[in-house]
Image (cartoon, helix red, strand yellow):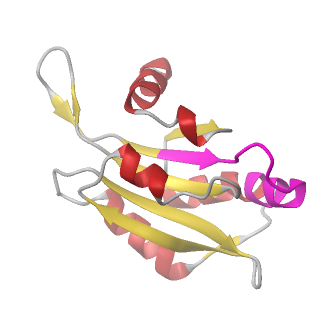
Amino acid sequence: MEICTVDPELKAKLTKFRFRKSQTNAAIIMKINKDDLTVVLEEELEDCDLDEVKDNLSEHQPRYLVYSFKQTHPDGRISYPLCFVYISPEGCKPEQHMMYAGSKTELVKETGMTKVFELRSLEELTDEWLIASIKKLY
């Protein structure tokens, strides 16, 4: 079910972000513009960690997050996983939750994300949670 459309500028930015060559952590935070029901860019962060990302996320409203980070594996390999996280804090308005939840699948499909996760609390968004969640996919 598609409720909202994706802003074409955001779609282009996400494509560029997906293929970026930088070796720093980075994030794109997205929200739904209620006026025209479009998923838009809220914030773009470069050279950031998850604590900085959490500082830029609403504690009371749902958000979409795309996060790329440096991951060092036990065998010494380095990778830069690209993760999509839908965050819908407890206590947000039910209509907001439904609007974001209903638009998530289309946004994920349009952006080609494969590592997709959901959270109900910002406190859960940690490096340990993210790495463990990625491991569960494989």
Residue at image point 75% right, 84% down: 36
Q: Residue 70's x, y, as percent?
A: 23, 39
Q: Is residue 89 left or right of residue 125?
A: right
Segment tinted magenta in the rendering: 84-101
Which image quadrant is residue 116 in? top right
The reply to whether residue 66 is in sight is no
Q: Residue at x 33, y 68 (%)?
A: 16
Most extreme residue toward the right is 94
Q: Is residue 89 magenta?
A: yes
Magenta region includes residue 119: no
The residue lying at 74 percent from left, 70 percent from top is: 4
Residue located 80% across and 66% down the image: 3
Which of these two is toward me, 28 or 127?
127
Residue 21 to residue 113: above or below? below
Question: Residue 105: where, in percent of width, then height?
Answer: 68, 51
Give how far across and how far down residue 44 sits, in percent.
39, 68
Q: Is residue 45 left or right of residue 23?
A: right
Foreground pick, 37 / 107: 37
Q: Quadrant of the C terminus?
A: top left
Q: Quadrant of the N terminus?
A: bottom right
- In this view, the residue farthest toward the left is 76
Q: Is residue 116 left or right of residue 88?
A: left
